[in-house]
Amino acid sequence: MSQPQATMPSRDRATPTKVAGLSMLERPGPGPAVLLLHGIGSNARSFAPLFPALPAELRLIAWNAPGYLGSEPLAADWPVAADYARAAERLLDGLGLARVHVVGHSLGTLIAAALAEHAPQRVASLTLAAAANGYGCDRGAALPPGVAARLEDLERLGAAAFSRARAPRLVFDPAANRAVVAQVEAEMAQIDPGGYGQALRMLASGDLPGTVARLGHRPNFIIGAEDRITPPDQTQAAAAAWPAARDGRPEVAVIPRAGHAVHQQAPVPFARALLRLVPALRGTQPLPGKGDPHDG
């Protein structure tokens, strides 16, 4: 008698839940687990377009960082990337996951790299998208002008007007991609000023190239070719910090016709780049066919 075939989870099915004081979206799957860490003006929902583009076997976990969408804030007024990495470890402990593939976007690249530095045994692979290199400020020092201006703008405008002003800059050709801009704006409008302020201070003290230089994992990089927020030269600088004598230069996958919100604007090319960079995630089920406007 033939054995019944295992039913694969839907690529689109994601469930909001909360573990260890952190809220998240999770898509179940029997295969490798992938932890997705969002950027500073975003939240877990930014990864929703990516879910159906990735193999159904994968267990996808998109967190809301401390201070975002119901996740408890960190205790320190000026946290550093390692504080967020420890929160990510608590989440993994709560989920019973010893080891995951980690994908960080923008501010999430600082957290992902800190997790790989401080808990390398928990990281099966490391992929950094739209790398945010940080400003290397001392904790408690004056914020760089651009960082301080963002806090001032948020306080002056409020979250809705702040997101309306900033969202188009995250998308390549915003006039032709209004739906993506609307999605980015809707997520940014949900930021909490307290959590956002903590994250901005962490960004000010961040030093992604310095962290990459100390890593035991060789990172992978993905960048939107038209990124105006963290331009490709930032990603190239972070990649160049990896000592070539260790295991060759990291590969940088460049997604054409995509801006800073590369995983939202070009989810299928982003997924294919990720699967090429991390073969362990490829799975056995066919990926969606062409149809993404950015699919080459």
Image (tube, rainbow, N blue to C red):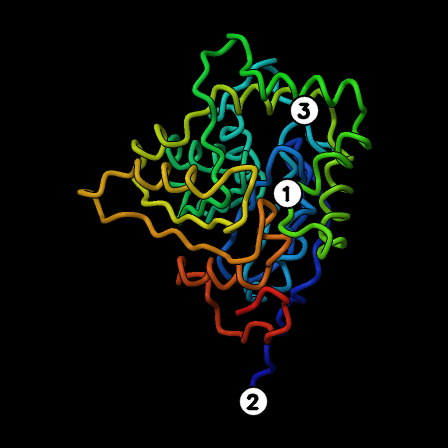
Quarter assignment of residue 9:
bottom right
Q: In terms of secondary structure, where does tag 1 sit?
A: helix
**Residue at mark 2:** 2
Between discs 1 and 3, the one toward the N terminus: 1
Q: Residue 247: give x, y in percent of width and height.
A: 22, 48
**Residue at mark 3:** 195
Q: CA distance from mark 1 to mark 3?
A: 20 Å
Which kind of residue does numbered mark 1 sit on? Leu
> Is residue 260 positioned above or below 77 on the image?
below
Q: Nearer the viewer, residue 155 or 70?
A: 155
Q: Nearer the viewer, residue 130 or 104?
A: 130
Query: Any mark on residue 170, and which?
Result: 1
Which kind of residue does numbered mark 3 sit on? Gly
Front position among marks 1 and 2:
1
Q: CA distance from mark 1 to mark 2?
A: 51 Å
Front position among marks 1 and 3:
1
Q: Residue 18: give x, y in percent of width and height.
A: 70, 39
Cβ–Cβ below 8 Å for labels 1 and 2? Answer: no
> Is residue 157 positioned above or below 15 on the image?
above
Apparent side of residue 190 relative to residue 250 in the rendered image (left or right): right
Give the residue displayed 40% in from the left and 34% down from the top.
119
Which kind of residue does numbered mark 2 sit on? Ser
Between discs 1 and 2, the one toward the N terminus: 2
> Is residue 58 positioned above or below 141 on the image?
below
